[in-house]
Amino acid sequence: MTAVEKLEVVDTPEVPASQPGLFRRAWALPRAKLGAALTAAVVLVAVLGPWLGPVITGHDPTDFAGKPFKHDGIAGTDGIGRDVLTRFLAGGSTLLLYAVLATAIGIVLGAAVGMFAGYSGGRLDGVVMRGNDVLLSFPQLVFALLAIAMIGPHGWLLVTVIGVTHAPRIARVARQATVAVVASDYIRAAEMYGVPRWRILTGEVLPNITGPLMVELGLRLTYSIGYVASLSFLGLGIQPPTADWGLMINENRIALIVQPWGVLLPVLAIAVLTVGTNLITDALASAAAREEAR
Amino acid sequence: MSLDVTDLRVSTVDGSPVLHGVSYAIAPGEILALVGESGSGKTTAGLAALGHFRRGLVPAGGAVTVGDTDILSLTEPERRALRGRAVAYVPQDPALSLNPSLRIGRQIAEVLEAHGAPDAERVAEVLAEVGLPTDEAYQRRYPHQLSGGQQQRVGIAMAFACRPSVVVLDEPTTGLDVTTQALVLETVGALAAEHQVAALYITHDLAVVAQIADRVAVMRDGRIVETGATRDVLGHPTHAYTRELLDAVPSLDGPAPAGHEGTPVLAAKDVSVSYGEIDVLRGVGITVDSGECLMLLGESGSGKTTLSQCLSGLTAHYTGSVELDGVALPPSVRRRSAAQLRDVQYVFQSPFSSLNPRKTIAQSVELPLTRLTTMDKAQRRERVAEMLDRVRLGRSLAHRLPDQLSGGERQRAAIARALVTTPRVLVCDEVTSALDVSVQATVLDVLNDLRRDMGMAILFVTHNIALAREVADRIAVLLDGRIAECGPVDDVLTRPTHAYTRELLANTPRL
């Protein structure tokens, strides 16, 4: 076949560029940059705040700094005379840490369950996912309230409860994405080459569902921040006298008119943080959807 | 001339040219075939006749004249008014173009309504034109209650319903089996002649062209490289590219392949598979001898993929037995030993779904070696490189991801992955059906070379009897889950014993 040799030459076009990765495509969107800037600003405050606070104001978060609700210093004092700015700067790190840990637990647990169910298929899939649906029918916050009311307001419990209640939601998404990937022939091929199940899940399935999982990660992080702050606000999360944004809102809300900073600063920080993570998530979702369309 | 396209230029919105000045004209009642491989611009050139440009493409010069109207100078609403009445379109996949929730009678009436008053009689007439039943019960069917061929004929009926002067048909028979294809081609030819319609037939299949077209235009890289009467172009091609395309077309006529002596390697004995009430395979028995290529021929729904998956352990719930060297193989790949897995390898139909998009070609090809052999890393690397050479993939491709490769390159990578453990039997499931004809020729050539060099047996599963002489020593014809006929290629092609094989041969278009 002489045609074949000739076509061989024809058959070598210039190297087509591979599609850039999910993060690079998401980063190309303006909202990703805005979201990252907002998130970074709040994270910076939360992480550096505990050290910066005393340096700037000369007070410790739990110190008595002056008369209650006075407008001394930059942001004044709270109801028992502690410096609001110092407490604000100190109050983000725990919230952030808890939110990140809870999201991590949720993603790992949810992805594992979802991928397992989606790959197994059949009856096992049905049983696992119906159990999942039952868990889904409870509001997350009710679960958290129940557990904390029973065991007590411990940090580890807060993280675990939020993480575990995230899992069924993430499992759903992970299962759906897995089912689509499992239909591909390369999964059949891997089975044919004797690749064990867990290696198929981690090596063949997981890299192909990172798009939806990253979107879930961002979304659940946003929710986690909200839940940790809410529970602290309700007095079931981080306990006084520790400085915490959720708690500060509760402590200072009675004096909103007299001394608005005690409420405004933490509210602003939480709002900016959630909007920031949400914008990043949104950009990731667009990038992942575009990938699917290809 | 009904349709006159002169010096048409189309480019992408960011300015890179797609068509570099394409000109063609079609007289009333004439069928012009626009031939080319994927990416040649044939669909873009064809859709331009309707004044339609796909997203991201814009006309950059030239003229498209239908009758006396210059389509490109019209506004979009004016073009839309022309479609159906003056120009019409038959898309590639009728299953996607018919509304699944409208009865077909209603859908045809809708087309007629858009361009005047419809009546029930006219709908029946339109159906009769394409040889479909006209009764009320048939008109009340939904598209999913029709076969693929009937759906396509409804599509054709709708295109011809308002007596347009130009009809563009975009590979309308690609998804159909040869018998249905023959019927559809006949319908198109008759309608075009009867109503003096200028038909533009877009296709990659030169054998179909030979059957239907009056004239041919061969396209490549956005240019028409050769044009002329079908007989002249196919009989005496002047352009090198046309000759290449013609050479790559598999032919049913030719010398008999040398007979093959071998001992049975892989055998299916009395294999039956059923899904609920439906029997997919009913006691099938085939044997693949060492070093031979057995073609398993069947149309969609004949059970050929199910059979090949039983052999390779991808379908486990069958009765009967699959034997390797006379020893029964466990039904599921999960229970087969590494040696058994190495010996029987499978190549999937679509190279677009058989390679993990997140792994480089080298990683994918290395996978069977990692799992099924005890080679160390250096040995595996060397073996992968050697195998990629054998399937004629350059080493520079080894570290690319699948989406950086063409379809043919991907399929060769998939073949390399199947061959890297030197199997004794290679099961190829429709491995060329997703590929262009010249790419198909390359892949078949690679397979033939490998068979000669490595001495393995091949079970070549296909719906295309035209490939028989290119690859096979023997043919087994599968019909409704049973082997209808089995024998050496020459016997089956020249003296078919089963009526079905005779029908297939009669309906397969030839150059």
Image: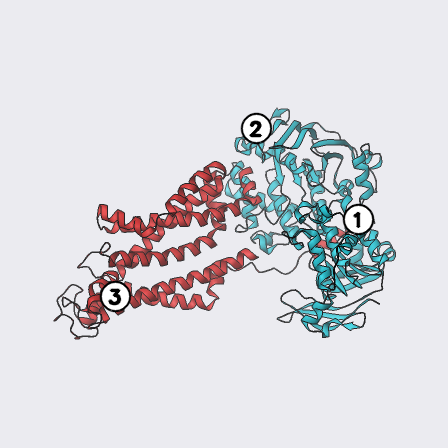
Chain colours: A red, B cyan
Disc 1: which residue: B131
Q: Quadrant of residue A45?
A: bottom left
Task: Inspect the image, locate mark 1, and give the three-letter code of the amino acid beneath it.
Answer: Gly
Comparing B250 with B479, the one in front is: B479
Q: Are marks 3 and 2 in contact (CB under 8 Å)?
A: no
Comparing A68 with B242, the one in front is: A68
Task: Inspect the image, locate mark 2, and give the three-letter code of the amino acid beneath it.
Answer: Pro
Disc 3: which residue: A49
Mark 3 residue crowding within 10 angstroms, few (<14) / some (14–19) / many (20+): many
For marks 1 and 2 on the same chain, the one whose residue lies earlier in the sequence? 1
Comparing B317 with B469, the one in front is: B317
Q: State the image coordinates of residue A23 (x, y, percent, origin top left).
A: 46, 60
Element class at badge 3: helix
Q: Are marks 1 and 2 in contact (CB under 8 Å)?
A: no
Per the model, the C-alpha gap separating discs 3 and 2 is: 65 Å
- Mark nearest the camera among 1 and 3 is 1
**Looking at the image, which residue is at 36% across and 59% down?**
A222
Q: Quadrant of residue B299?
A: top right
Element class at badge 2: loop
Please give the count of numbered marks on the rendered protein.
Answer: 3
The N terminus of chain B sits in image quarter: bottom right
Per the model, the C-alpha gap separating discs 1 and 2 is: 49 Å
Q: State the image coordinates of residue A242 (x, y, percent, origin top left).
A: 19, 59
Question: Would residue B35 be seen by someone viewing this image from the given angle?
Answer: no
Disc 2: which residue: B330
Q: Are marks 1 and 2 on the same chain?
A: yes
Q: State the image coordinates of residue B189 (x, y, percent, origin top left).
A: 83, 54
